[in-house]
Image (cartoon, helix red, strand yellow):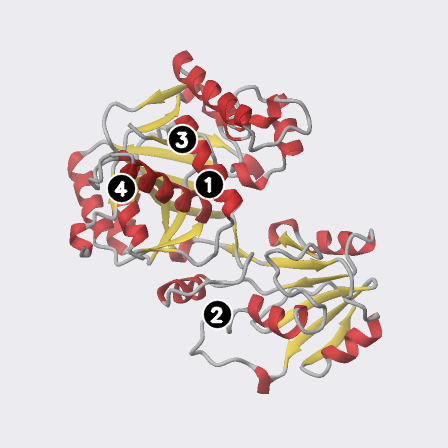
Amino acid sequence: MTHAEIPLAAPFRALRPAAEHAAGVVAPPYDVVSTDEAREIGSARPRSFLHGSRAEIHLPPGTDPHSPAVYAHAADTFERWQRSGILLREEAPSFYVYRMTMGRHTQTGVAFAASVAAYETHRIRRHELTRPDKENDRVRHIEALNAQTGPVLCAYRASDALAALLAAAARTQPLLDVEGPNGVRHAVWRIADRATAASLERELNALPALYIADGHHRSAAAARVAAERRGRGGSASPDASHERFLTVAFPHDEMRIFDYNRVVRDLGGRDASALLAALREEFEVGPTLKPVRPGRPAEFGMYLQGVWHRLRLKKALLPGADDPVAALDVSLLQERVLGPLLGIGDPRTDPRIDFVGGVRGLDELERRVDRGEAAVAFALHPTKMEQLMAVADANRLMPPKSTWFEPKLADGLLSHVLD
């Protein structure tokens, strides 16, 4: 099928909180909090969406979060909120402007139902592998609730036409306007004007591609649910609700990627002196008095035995521009340091490595090492949106934990019901 035959984006009948309940419902994404963190938030906020997205918090400690009882409790909570009017279903399909403000940073995008067929044919492009257990969890959650409750965060190449349409639609009073986790302001406008909605749909469907930024497991799970429903005799029409998935897309030049740093539990049998000597074979290495936040590609900060070091890959070893994956800093660190020097073969499965989002700051890296939780920490230069799109365009995959996006979309403000 051609792009013209596969509508990339469509309006949808959103399930959303009543305005007076939105501040209590808004919640962090289900996958950025632990069970203990979710339980603590949920105990203080009885209408937090975590009661539906992380329903294990209502069951005894130690309960398997993937047990049937968890999904059943999530479904009961979801249905009860709808009966009581905490969550309302819109009468007509609509597009929604979605704006996030974090400090001085603002980004304005659009919420819609994205095409599963476009995902399956690489027009909605991914850049990460998924884990089967996390996919299975989201499949079971969608089936239990008959809804997608966590939006996929996507990017599109910035468009003046889309920017003008979204700016005009956001000049009115927002439908929802709440402060979510980490002080992020989330504002949502329903686009009710038919002419504006038609223009927006036309511009969205003219986009050559969308790029998944955050939500690879959600999108993969939505595609699996669609395939399973087709197999059970469900409609294969692109207009069927299960043939679409909840998405919020922003222009690529408004999105922010933070560094995604690494900590390693031990030095792989080396001592600190031997590690530094091995690093000097390929890097310019120098200790510093201050924490190292890398200011350019192929530069790394390393915290070892209470001392920060700046690592710069020697010019002769810099990769060419023809391989978008090899040029990533996460690839350089893995191929030059983590694998050969520290013995981290597969960072997706090796228990000796952990990942720390840059939003936590370099202090968190120091804390992990100083407390003995890790022997060494590495600070990376953030991946750029242009790099992400180049990898996705080439139908390649990034190493795990290559990007950390902030601000993050909230759960609970918009859900997509599968009719």
For residue 90, above or below residue 241: above
Q: Position of residue 114 (x, y in %)?
A: 30, 44
Tell me the quadrant of the picture where the N terminus can be found: bottom left
- Which is nearer the N-term, disc 4 or disc 2? 4
Q: Is residue 129 visible?
A: yes
Q: For marks 1 and 3, give the one nearer the viewer.
A: 3
Q: Earlier in the sequence, mark 1 or mark 4?
A: 4
The residue labelled by disc 3 is: 143
Disc 2 marks a residue whose amino acid type is: Val
| Pick the front one: 234 or 317 | 234
- Disc 1 residue type (three-letter): Leu
Q: Nearer the viewer, mark 2 or mark 1?
A: 2
Q: Foreground mark, 3 or 2?
A: 3
Kindly state the secondary structure of the residue where label 1 is placed: loop
**Cβ atoms under marks 4 and 3 closer than 8 Å:** no
Label 4 and label 3: CA atoms lie apart by 37 Å
Q: Residue at x 42, y 65 (%)?
A: 396
- Label 4 or label 3, whichever lies nearer to me, is 3
Label 1 and label 4: CA atoms lie apart by 22 Å
Q: Is residue 334 left or right of residue 120?
A: right
Question: Residue pushed farthest top?
Answer: 84
Q: Secondary structure at mark 3?
A: helix
Residue nearest the observer in this picture, 161 or 280 = 280
- The disc, 3 or 2, on the residue closer to the chain's N-terminal end is 3
Q: Identify which amino acid the numbered label 4 is placed on.
A: Ala
Q: Quadrant of residue 349?
A: bottom right
Q: Which mark is residue 409?
A: 1
Residue at screen point 61% across, 54% down: 358
Looking at the rendered structure, the secondary structure element under dot 2 is loop
Q: Which residue is mark 4?
A: 168
